[in-house]
Amino acid sequence: MEDFATSVGRAESNHVALDDERVSRQHAIIQRTGVAGWRITDLDSTNGTFVNDQRIRADRPLRDRDRIRLGDAELVFCTEARSPETQRRTVVGPLSAPPHVTRRERDVLVALCRPLFTNDRFPRPATTREICAELVITESAVRHHLDRLYDKFEIYDDDADERRRHLATDAIRRGVVVEADALRDGHDERRA
């Protein structure tokens, strides 16, 4: 990714050129905003730009692991530093289907992911206690659901914070939790 702006579209002159007739020649631009922020802007494309399955109308902030869809192409936005060897081996491909989750496991996932859809500068997934407070269930119940979800999503980190972060980003990346879920029940903190 370029230091300040990256153009995406069908034209070969773009930084990221996509061979897809549903992608406009100059489709979107991804720009750095400040020290750690990034935004994506749709350039009046014919078929639209989607971030985490939500069509953007003008521009919107990007977070690590956001899924960007242009035409039939799906890209995953990554802010983590990668070595040159890793960058060369990165492959954009179809996402694997998410595992089946129960209604209550999905409730736990939505509560876990909700803080990631706020405008906090450094968002983090909800803690066990925050999930308990939102869902009005015990800590042991939350831990039980999280343990089952870690198994279903095949997340085996030793560090509890890393496990929660990986589960949240994977649930969002694979479409189990979308922004509209986080905005339900009057929890739209961005309007405050």
Image: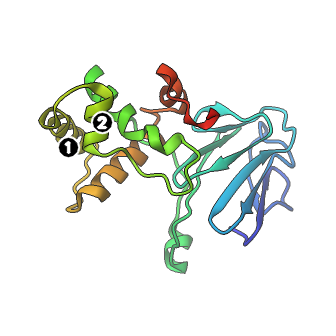
Is the residue marked by circle 1 packed among few (<14), some (14-19), or many (20+) residues within 10 Å? Answer: few
Is the residue marked by circle 2 packed among few (<14), some (14-19), or many (20+) residues within 10 Å? Answer: many
Q: Does 3 appear above or below 139?
A: below
Q: Does 108 appear above or below 67?
A: above
In this view of the protein, which residue sits in the foreground, 192 or 123? 192
In this view of the protein, which residue sits in the foreground, 65 or 141? 141
Residue 11 is left or right of residue 8, and the answer is: right
Relative image position of residue 110 (x, y in whole percent): 39, 32
The amino acid at mark 2 is Ile
- Quarter of the rendering occupied by the N terminus: bottom right
Residue 118 is left or right of residue 135, and the answer is: right
Residue at 26% over, 51% down: 155
Res 87 quadrant in image: bottom right
Q: CA distance from mark 1 to mark 2?
A: 19 Å
Res 107 quadrant in image: top left
Q: Which residue is mark 2?
A: 131
Say which of marks 1 and 2 sits in front: 2
The amino acid at mark 1 is Asp
Q: Quick one: SS at disc 2?
A: helix
Relative image position of residue 170 (x, y in whole percent): 40, 46
Relative image position of residue 52 (x, y in whole percent): 57, 38
Residue at 53% over, 41% down: 117
Residue at 47% over, 20% down: 185
Q: Quick one: SS at disc 1?
A: helix
Q: Does 192 appear above or below 38?
A: above
Q: Which residue is mark 1?
A: 151
In the rendered image, is residue 68 in sight? yes
Relative image position of residue 189 (x, y in whole percent): 55, 35
- Quarter of the rendering occupied by the C terminus: top right
Q: Does 28 appear above or below 15?
A: above
In the rendered image, is residue 102 in sight? no
